[in-house]
Image: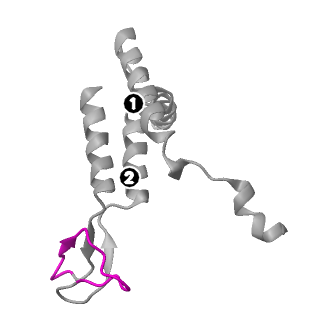
Amino acid sequence: INAVAAAARKHLLEYHEGWFQCKNPVCRRLTRTMPLGSAKCRACHEGLERKSTEANLYTQLVYFQSLFDMERAQKKLEAENKERKEKGKQELKLDLKPDEAAFCNDLHRFVTDRYVNKSGFNYINLGNLFTSIFS
């Protein structure tokens, strides 16, 4: 659990540090300051973009969540075995001891509860989304 939490914290910290990177592939200068009035690099005057975006952070957190999702793994295994059976190949088995499966479930719950569910990127308020259409 500590390794997963440390990796998630690393990505959260990288996002919250707020680094911007020059879009110019030659320059690629990093800065945390945004010039007033424009998002231009001070060195080459090209545009700046966030180094770590909300979407990248959310994708990484969902990846950590999917690593330990036993239900998803079981469904994928069943689909794979169905294809293998049609081709006449031997079926694959998921041989986990009960304590290993419980550990994976605990890690999945930990990542889901602690990181993914707390992400604002995970929530869409449909009432606000359609307000302009129906008002």
Instruction: Name the kind of residue labelled 1 in the image.
Output: Phe
Return the disc, 1 or 2, that comes first in the chain's sequence. 2
Q: Is residue 18 visible?
A: yes
Q: Is mark 1 on a helix, strand or loop?
A: loop
**Which image quarter is the N terminus in?**
top left
Instruction: Name the kind of residue labelled 2 in the image.
Output: Leu
Q: Where is residue 34 in the image (x, y as percent from the top left)?
A: 31, 75
- Which residue is drawn at the image coordinates 17% and 75% (left, top)? 29
Q: What element carries label 2?
A: helix
* Corner quadrant of residue 94: top left
Q: What's the image's color scheme?
A: one colour
Q: Name the residue under label 1.
A: 68
- Which residue is drawn at the image coordinates 38% and 52% (left, top)? 57
Q: Mark 2 points at which residue?
A: 57
- Which residue is drawn at the image coordinates 25% and 68% (left, top)? 32
- Which residue is drawn at the image coordinates 19% and 71% (left, top)? 30
Relative to 113, say whether 19 is above or below: below
* Magenta region, residue range: 25-41
Q: Judge from the rendering whether residue 47 lies leftward or rightward of residue 31; answer left or right.
A: right
Q: Position of residue 98 (x, y in %)?
A: 39, 10
Relative to 72, say whether 30 is above or below: below
> In the image, is residue 23 part of the stretch drawn in magenta?
no
Q: Judge from the rendering whether residue 11 lies leftward or rightward of residue 120; answer left or right.
A: left
Q: Which of marks 1 and 2 is in front?
A: 2
